[in-house]
Structure formats: structure tokens, C-alpha cells
Image (cartoon, rainbow, N blue to C red):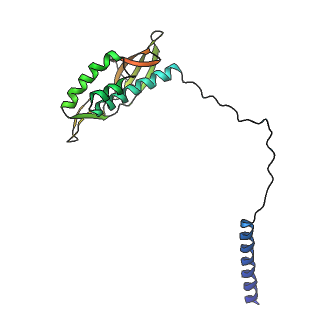
């Protein structure tokens, strides 16, 4: 009797599995509601970045472009990379400075960590970024040996960087280190 119950239980389990598998493989068609003819997707217009956000992006982009220009090890490439980040009149002097770095066999090392305190509009087409920048892991590295040559600054350097709006782009025009304590 006990064996009969076990056999019935097994057969019942096999039957249930078979039914479940058959249900998974069956083609049941469900009618979807009709889409109204006038239905359209809602048009989502992305929010425009604020002037402050654009100035910060330009400031941070300048640092990235400078590293890329140094790493290019080529005056023409560096000129192209820097264009759009600094005024055209500043590019030759920057590239000449990079030539000295290239002659030493150095490349850029690391990247700054930004701690932007504020952005001030100093005129209709000028701005100043106040940054408690961390330059402690930024500097130069010998390309062949991998040896770190030097850093650009400390972990809490108060820096005011000026930008000007030219032809629709915010360009970095200068940076002034400030002797002031930084906290973030």
C-alpha cells in the first residue's frame, strides 16, 4: 500500500511537470489594447546647463587638454588640442613650454582633484573659478624610466582661474595661486 502511494505520488509529480512544460510551450495569444491614432511620445527637452556649469566644464576641460597636449609630444597636435581651451594668442607660449618638457623625456602624470568653492561672474564675458585644488598627485613622469619627476602642487592649493567667453567658448586666461587656507 505504501508503495502504491509512492507510485501515485511520483506519477502525479511527473504529470504536473509535464503539464507545466506544456503550458510553457503553448502559444496563447493575448489581444493588446488598440493604440489611439493620435498617441505620440512626450517630447523631452533636456535642461540646458547653467553658465556656472559650462564655466566649470571649461575649467576642468582645460586641465585635461593640457595633459593630453603634453602627452602628444608633438607641437602641431598640442596646438590643436589646446585650441578651444585657451585664447589663440596663448597657445604658442604654452607649446614652447611643453617643448622643454618633451626634451627632458617627460609626460604628464596624474590629474588634479577639483574642490570648486565657487564661480563668480566678474563681467559680462568673464568669470573666475575659485578652487581648492588638490595637485598632490599631479606632475611629470619620465617616459622611459617611469620615475616621477615632480609635482605641480599641494593637496590644498587655493587657485583662482580666470576665463573669458570668446566665440561662444569659455577659455582659460590665467591662474592665480592665493595664499589662503583651503578647506573642503
Query: Residue 69, position in %: x, y?
Result: 31, 29
Query: Residue 129, position in %: x, y?
Result: 42, 19
Query: Residue 81, position in %: x, y?
Result: 35, 27
The reply to whether residue 184 is in sight is no
146 with respect to 14 (left or right): left
Q: Residue at x 76, y 63 (%)?
A: 27
The reply to whether residue 92 is in sight is yes
Residue, far top? 123
31 with respect to 85 (left or right): right
| Quadrant of the image occupied by residue 35 | top right
Q: Residue at x 40, y 27 (%)?
A: 61
| Quadrant of the image occupied by residue 6 | bottom right
Query: Residue 100, position in %: x, y?
Result: 20, 27
Residue, far front? 76
Is residue 8 shown above or below 137? below
Residue, far left? 104
Q: Quadrant of the N terminus?
A: bottom right
In the rendered picture of this protein, how many numbered marks are placed on residues? 0
Q: Nearer the viewer, residue 171 or 39?
A: 39
Q: Nearer the viewer, residue 60 or 25?
A: 25
13 with respect to 157 (left or right): right
Q: Quadrant of the C terminus?
A: top left
| Quadrant of the image occupied by residue 112 | top left
Q: Residue at x 74, y 70 (%)?
A: 22
Amino acid at each position: 500500500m505504501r508503495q502504491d502511494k509512492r507510485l501515485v505520488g511520483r506519477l502525479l509529480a511527473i504529470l504536473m511537470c509535464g503539464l507545466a512544460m506544456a503550458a510553457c510551450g503553448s502559444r496563447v495569444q493575448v489581444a493588446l489594447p488598440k493604440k489611439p491614432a493620435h498617441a505620440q511620445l512626450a517630447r523631452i527637452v533636456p535642461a540646458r546647463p547653467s553658465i556656472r556649469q559650462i564655466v566649470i566644464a571649461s575649467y576642468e576641460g582645460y586641465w585635461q587638454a593640457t595633459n593630453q597636449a603634453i602627452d602628444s609630444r608633438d607641437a602641431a597636435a598640442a596646438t590643436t588640442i589646446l585650441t578651444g581651451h585657451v585664447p589663440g594668442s596663448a597657445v604658442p607660449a604654452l607649446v614652447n613650454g611643453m617643448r622643454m618638457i618633451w626634451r627632458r623625456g617627460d609626460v604628464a602624470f596624474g590629474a588634479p582633484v577639483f574642490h570648486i568653492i565657487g564661480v563668480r561672474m566678474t563681467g559680462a564675458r568673464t568669470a573666475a573659478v575659485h578652487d581648492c585644488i588638490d595637485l598632490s598627485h599631479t606632475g611629470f613622469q619620465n617616459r622611459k624610466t617611469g620615475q616621477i619627476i615632480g609635482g605641480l602642487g599641494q593637496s590644498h592649493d587655493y587657485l583662482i582661474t580666470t576665463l573669458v567667453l570668446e566665440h561662444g567658448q569659455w577659455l582659460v586666461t590665467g591662474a592665480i595661486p592665493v595664499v589662503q587656507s583651503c578647506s573642503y
